[in-house]
Amino acid sequence: MDKPRQGFRSLWNISFGFFGIQIGFALQNANVSRIFQSLGTSIDDLPLLWIAAPLTGLIVQPVIGHYSDRTWGPLGRRRPYFLAGAVLATLALIAMPNAPILWVAAVLLWLLDGSLNVAMEPFRAFVGDMLNRSQRTAGYAFQTAFIGAGAVVGSLAPLILTDGFGVENVAAAGMIPASVRYGFYIGGAALLIAVLWTVATTREYPPAELAAFDADGVEAAPVRRAVTAGGRQAPLWIAAGAIVVAGVARFGLDRPVYLLGFGLIGFGVAHLASAAMVARGRTDSVLPQIIADLADMPATMRKLALVQFCTWSALFIMWIYTTPIVTQRVFGATDTSGAAYNDGANWVGVLFAVYNGVATLWAFVLPRLAARIGRRDTHILGLVAGAAGFAAFLLVRDAYLLLGAMVLIGIAWSSILTMPYAMLSGALPPAKLGVYMGLFNIFIVLPQLIVSAAMGQVARAFFPGDPVWAMAIAAAVMLLAAGMMMRLPRAA
């Protein structure tokens, strides 16, 4: 028995909440570096302050996925998490542009990103829950369209408020312009309203009905076997982490790189703790369950995970460095309280709106293109386009010509948000769709953590004061991701 096909209205309702969530992410991505710089942060220290976001996602997404698989109540299975995350994210959006000092802004970034992750993660599984296999490419493409549209609104909000309504775009040193503050307030309201729309207009399948639909799905592997095998590998992870920590101390690397070493040690310790819990018969605890699910990832997921790792490394470099690159190279400004810097920062909002707008439109092309050349080759095409867009930053100093680079990046962004999930959803155990989508997102946030920890060191060592070369690294890893896609079968 298969799930019934959904019409246009149902596809709209299922994913409309993502429109609001992406407004929040777009405001964060386009303006957080601006807020940090306005509060006195140097370019080289930006990656360190961004580190809260990937750390939060690394922990939150698998846990929320695990619990959303096991939740059922008056609001259903996934919708309670949409709503809770949206409320918390709205509060964080209101508070962040009012941060009086830098450490408060860093804490609020942690709260904002964590809340957005709580709301976002179950949406990926929600499409798999609600749609049959033949509609999932269209379902994720629809979600991508809302992500792009929300990002356009969020990215352009300060510019629209300035040019359309005369809201002040310049503030005294150490202060956040009113255009940014009001943009965050409006974004918070839009986020909450959009998520409430999805909560109010969708009906989730009860557990028994969902199990009947997915009776022939992929089976999950036993917890005990997977955790025991992971426990045997734990000393290797701990040793690798200790080597990284010792290397940072020995060679005087940036202190954020310690996080990588301690993260490896923590991963090894988590394996040991899981093995100990399984030995005592506590196989239903959240930690052994997640460790087992990670160890038993389907082969398709393992290959796509490596692609995601490279892809999101490139994207995170772009989000961190676009503001300083554009303000410095195109607008010739380094004084964060000056009009030229703030005009450049607003133009970054335009650039981000363009790539998200292109992603919205390209999302309607993707299902037809995938039907003709296959999902794998469609994604390869998108990643190559993204690499070309990043490389263009090395050559272009004209603000308007950069729009062409963002068109290419928008094609990649649309594919990144659609094709991996469409390929992945059919390869996962249906009863564990939430936790596996959360684990898959580890390979989105882990590269962000690495970029945040190490990119400042790389920039100071190889291109001090000239952040545009970070885009060369982004282009290279995006091409690497395209090459890794060749490891998947053409029919994936």
Image (cartoon, helix red, strand yellow):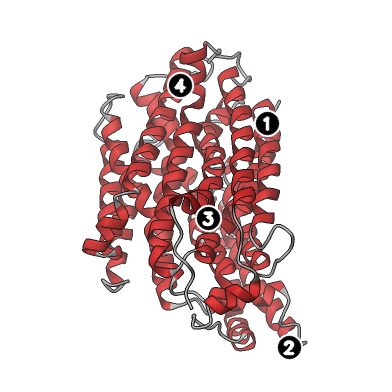
* Residue at x 41%, y 45% (from the top left corner): 145
Instruction: Out of 343 and 317, give the one closest to the viewer.
Output: 343
Query: What residue did someone put label 1 on?
Result: 94
Q: Quadrant of the C terminus?
A: bottom left
Choose the circle earlier in sequence order: 4 or 1: 1
User: Relative to 25, does residue 84 appear above or below in the rendering?
Assistant: below
Q: Which amino acid does the dot numbered 1 rest on? A: Ile
Q: Position of residue 340 (x, y in %)?
A: 43, 15
Q: Element type at marker 1?
A: helix
Q: Which amino acid does the dot numbered 3 rest on? A: Val
Disc nearest the viewer among 2 and 4? 2
User: Relative to 12, does residue 444 appear above or below in the rendering?
Assistant: below
Query: What residue did someone put label 4 on?
Result: 334
Q: Which amino acid does the dot numbered 2 rest on? A: Ala
As measured in the structure, the alpha-carbon distance from the residue carrying label 2 to the one carrying label 4 is 58 Å
- Asked whether disc 4 touches disc 3, contact meaning CB atoms under 8 Å apart, the reply is no
Disc nearest the viewer among 4 and 1? 1
Q: Residues within 10 Å of mark 3 (few under 14, many from 20)?
A: many
Instruction: Out of 46 and 253, give the one closest to the viewer.
Output: 46
Q: Position of residue 286 (x, y in %)?
A: 70, 72
Disc number placed over residue 445 in the picture, else none: 3
Residue furthest out toward the left: 372
Residue 105 picture quarter: top right
Q: Element type at marker 3?
A: helix
Q: Which amino acid does the dot numbered 4 rest on? A: Thr
- Asked whether disc 4 touches disc 1, contact meaning CB atoms under 8 Å apart, the reply is no
Choose the circle earlier in sequence order: 3 or 2: 2
User: Relative to 185, does residue 137 appear above or below in the rendering?
Assistant: below
Q: Element type at marker 4?
A: loop
Residue 399 picture quarter: top left
Query: What residue did someone put label 2 on?
Result: 279
Q: Residues within 10 Å of mark 1 (few under 14, many from 20)?
A: many
